[in-house]
């Protein structure tokens, strides 16, 4: 089969690789019909190379059609249409029963001290082949895939794999009260969708970014936006003026380690690229630091007694945090990988009720798998309006 594979920093390629096969009686094989490129895929493209292996198949936002089922699969048959959550959860362990599917005790990558395994995402998360490919082996066929009906296009359902539940959890964790306000930092796919979810719930939403295409896209849905480039250094004051002098009830940081600024952290990330992979991996595990511009901004913006919800991915181990400010402002922090199955039952009805979140038009580009390398480059450079790409093998 053809698959998009990692070969080094900013080097992804389309290769011919062996077809996946049933390995456990509960496995299913799906023929991938759509697979998103996620902002966190850019972490692999840019800074997490020490945890990758050459030829690793990328992608964790797939959906498709069941081709083959293992002997113990009773919930699916060949021809069923399914979405595959990005985190690999058994659905039956203690953590899954608590709604913490990203902490699944069956798939935790204990040798790395990490939570549930992920499709297409580094040795830290199990090095499981991903879904930017023609075929994908999916474990836990009775509990992991989300069966969806025939009829609507893939765009209606594919975002259940990651974007929708991640944004939904970000808003849930923000704990915005009725009639409350929330600032969303970063209007990439997750931040954009978080704005839509919060707006749909009736909250006052203020989206912040510095990419014109992203700002225009969110503003077009009737959501307030602020251009970071026009408020160099005074953004917290501007937002406080907009929110009765206090700041918003909550801030969602949808930026994470890709934040602009923080030259010291950028230097450290760049320098690890010159080290042997084994050395770089140990350095990043034990002494890695992130670009924390967005998180520091969130801490400054949020009102006293407010909540910060982190959906942007951070990977550092020695990140300096302003604990005095966090404590003094009585700020609550919530974060973590999205627990996909926890939120699917709440999201699914909206996909059949007039599309209030605009999923049908959410993707900016639909491209054949063979154009994957070019799509990664343009997405990383924020060129040509690349905000959300769906690859279609």
Image (cartoon, rainbow, N blue to C red):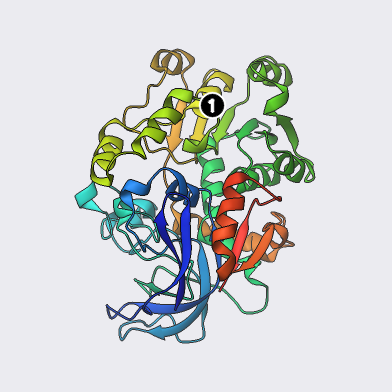
Q: Position of residue 161 (x, y in %)?
A: 51, 61
Q: Position of residue 22 (x, y in %)?
A: 32, 81
Asked which quadrant contains residue 145, the reply is bottom left
SS assignment at label 1: loop
Q: Residue at x 79, y 41 (%)?
A: 222
Q: 231 or 93: which is nearer to us?
A: 231
Q: Residue at x 39, y 17 (%)?
A: 323
Q: Is residue 62 above or below residue 314?
A: below
Can residue 116 be seen by looking at this rendering?
no
Instruction: Report the residue marked by disc 1.
Output: 261
Asked which quadrant contains residue 91, the reply is bottom left
Q: Is residue 179 above or below residue 19?
A: above
Q: Position of residue 286 (x, y in %)?
A: 25, 33
Q: Is residue 234 left or right of residue 331?
A: right
Q: Residue at x 53, y 33 (%)?
A: 259
Residue extending farthest left: 111
Q: Is residue 270 above or below residue 165?
A: above
Q: Position of residue 144 (x, y in %)?
A: 40, 68
Can residue 226 be seen by looking at this rendering?
yes
Q: Quadrant of the N terminus?
A: bottom left
Q: Quadrant of the C terminus?
A: bottom right
Say few, some or many: other residues with alpha carbon within 10 Å of mark 1 (under 14 / 14 to 19 / 20 or more): few
């Amino acid at each position: 089969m053809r698959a998009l594979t990692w070969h080094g920093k900013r080097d992804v390629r389309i290769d011919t690789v062996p077809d996946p096969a049933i390995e456990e009686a509960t496995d299913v094989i799906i023929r991938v019909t759509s697979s998103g490129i996620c902002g966190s895929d850019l972490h692999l493209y840019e800074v997490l190379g020490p945890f990758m292996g050459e030829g690793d198949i990328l992608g964790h936002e797939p959906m498709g059609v069941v081709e083959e089922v293992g002997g113990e699969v009773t919930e699916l048959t060949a021809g069923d249409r399914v979405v595959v959550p990005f985190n690999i959860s058994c659905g039956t362990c203690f953590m899954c029963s608590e709604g913490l599917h990203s902490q699944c005790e069956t798939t935790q990558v204990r040798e790395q001290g990490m939570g549930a395994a992920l499709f297409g995402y580094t040795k830290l998360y199990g090095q499981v082949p991903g879904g930017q490919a023609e075929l994908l082996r999916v474990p836990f066929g009775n509990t992991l895939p989300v069966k969806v009906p025939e009829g609507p296009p893939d765009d209606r359902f594919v975002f259940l794999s990651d974007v929708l539940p991640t944004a939904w959890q970000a808003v849930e964790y923000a704990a915005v009260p009725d009639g409350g306000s929330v600032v969303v930092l970063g209007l990439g796919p997750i931040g954009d969708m978080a704005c839509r979810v919060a707006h749909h719930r009736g909250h006052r939403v203020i989206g912040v970014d510095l990419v014109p295409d992203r700002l225009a896209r969110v503003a077009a849905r009737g959501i307030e936006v602020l251009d970071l480039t026009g408020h160099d250094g005074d953004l917290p004051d501007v937002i406080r003026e907009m929110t009765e002098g206090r700041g918003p009830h909550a801030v969602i940081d949808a930026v994470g380690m890709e934040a602009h600024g923080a030259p010291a952290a950028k230097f450290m990330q760049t320098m690890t690229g010159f080290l042997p992979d084994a050395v770089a991996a140990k350095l990043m595990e034990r002494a890695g630091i992130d670009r924390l511009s967005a998180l520091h901004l969130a801490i400054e913006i949020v009102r006293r007694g407010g909540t910060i919800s982190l959906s942007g991915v951070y990977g550092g181990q020695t990140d300096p945090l302003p604990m005095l400010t966090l404590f003094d402002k009585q700020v609550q922090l919530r974060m973590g990988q999205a627990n996909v199955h926890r939120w699917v039952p709440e999201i699914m009805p909206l996909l059949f009720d007039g599309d209030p979140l605009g999923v049908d038009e959410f993707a900016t580009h639909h491209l054949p798998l063979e154009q994957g390398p070019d799509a990664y480059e343009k997405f990383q450079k924020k060129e040509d309006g690349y905000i959300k790409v769906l690859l279609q093998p």
